[in-house]
Image (cartoon, rainbow, N blue to C red):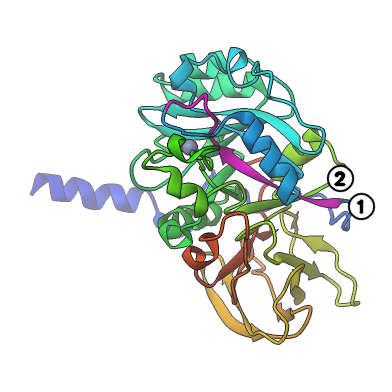
Amino acid sequence: MLAMATLCISSTAFGQANHVNPWVNLNPIIPPAAGIGKGIWLKGDLHVHSRHSKESSNNPISKIVNFCKTVGMDYVCITDHDNHVNGDVAHNTWADPEFKSESTLLLYGAEWTTTRGHGNVFSAVPYDHQRLFDVRDQRDVAVGAVKKQLGIHLSANHPSGKDHFGYSYDMLESIEVWNSVLWSKNAEAIMIWDDMLSSGRKLTGRGGSDAHHGVPDKPELATPNSKQAQANYVGTPTTWVFATARTKQAVVDALTNGQVSISANPYAPRVEFYADLDQDGKTDMMMGDNIKSTGRPVKFRVQLSGNTVADSAYTVKVVKNGSSFGTFKTTGKTPVYEFTDTPDSTGRTYYRVVVEGPGTDYPQVPQAKALNGNMVGLSNPIYFDFDPNF
Ligand SMILES: [Zn+2]
Ligand SMILES: [Zn+2]
């Protein structure tokens, strides 16, 4: 009885009706839309294991690099398990004489493989990975401080299920929303991504094949896992970045900024997503951009570039703030779908798109098309009223 009386008094005393949440910034300062600058689309894979990961097979760095050249990958990040070398990635993967390429930009990185989960680091230059490895079992506040000092891009890997990312998402730049050729296994990763976006975190979604096994050079070198090379290898899926230049730093910057689109394989169409703010027919924003909403309607444009299948129907699913906005059909040689909506005048809004349709052959990974089903690609969000200083 006494406890109940106390409860009644305190809820009145706190006066809920006029409550203002001091944590919510209702008027974040957001720079105006700068327009879409010059850039080039570069494609790559952000999660690949070489022979420096103990459970890999027939996958020396030279095989990965040669494969990248064959299928036209612009960049790749070889992300070996750091715990297999006690954190000393610098004297293993990066020191391998095969770690060089004239055609593909090789990012520096590793899979941060900890008891609390897996994450990938992406960097344009070598960094002291040992420090990130050493701090892995400390509290997030210590981990976050080291990560910040290193100036690296950190990304959650396969964030649901076993080896889920058990750290704070506040220290991340991106999340692996499409791991391996098996798109259907990523539903929970997408759910986590939408929750992080809906809570105000501007977090890039990216892909990664997580390939461990290469095609054996001789039949007698085959292992029980060698058949995986026919189904899941570099490029399943492929992550496209809209980079300001063909440099490693521009690739990492585009990843951080969210100018990123994920396709089923390097030959599959690429989903592009733009917005025209004043409806003058010119696009002012693309994926990853964040502006202040004006209260006026915005025209959005979804287009598929590359090897579309002539006269096929594609399904465009638009997600707004974590919920379905609508499902639409488009056809033609260069399929385009346009829709108009007014972002919320109070609070944040984001839109992202998923495109389904006919699969694309990937001759170097012949079973990929069948396993991938009808998934073609997905965009990153276009953002309104997200606090850049969150
Ligand atoms: Zn992993
Ligand atoms: Zn992995």
Could one spot residue 179 in this view of the protein? Answer: no
Disc 1 crowd rating (10 Å Cα; few below 14, some 14-19, many 20+) is: few
Asked if residue 75 is among those painted magenta in the image, a careful observer would answer no
Residues tagged 1 and 2 counted as in contact (Cβ below 8 A):
yes
Which type of secondary structure does the marked residue at label 2 adopt?
loop
- For image coordinates 71% across by 87% down, the residue present is 311
Give the image quarter of residue 97: top right
Could one spot residue 278 in this view of the protein? Answer: yes
Q: Is residue 230 left or right of residue 296?
A: left
Asked if residue 42 is among those painted magenta in the image, a careful observer would answer yes
- For image coordinates 51% across by 53% down, the residue present is 230
Q: Is residue 276 left or right of residue 257?
A: right
Q: CA distance from mark 1 to mark 2?
A: 6 Å
Considering the whole magenta stretch, tell me its main secondary structure: strand
- For image coordinates 82% across by 49% down, the residue present is 31
Name the residue beneath numbered marker 1.
38
Start-end of magenta stretch: 40-54
Three-letter residue code for mark 1: Lys
Three-letter residue code for mark 2: Thr
Q: Is residue 265 left or right of residue 141?
A: right
Badge number at residue 266: none
Badge number at residue 244: 2
Query: Where does residue 126 sit, x and y in percent of width and height?
Result: 70, 19
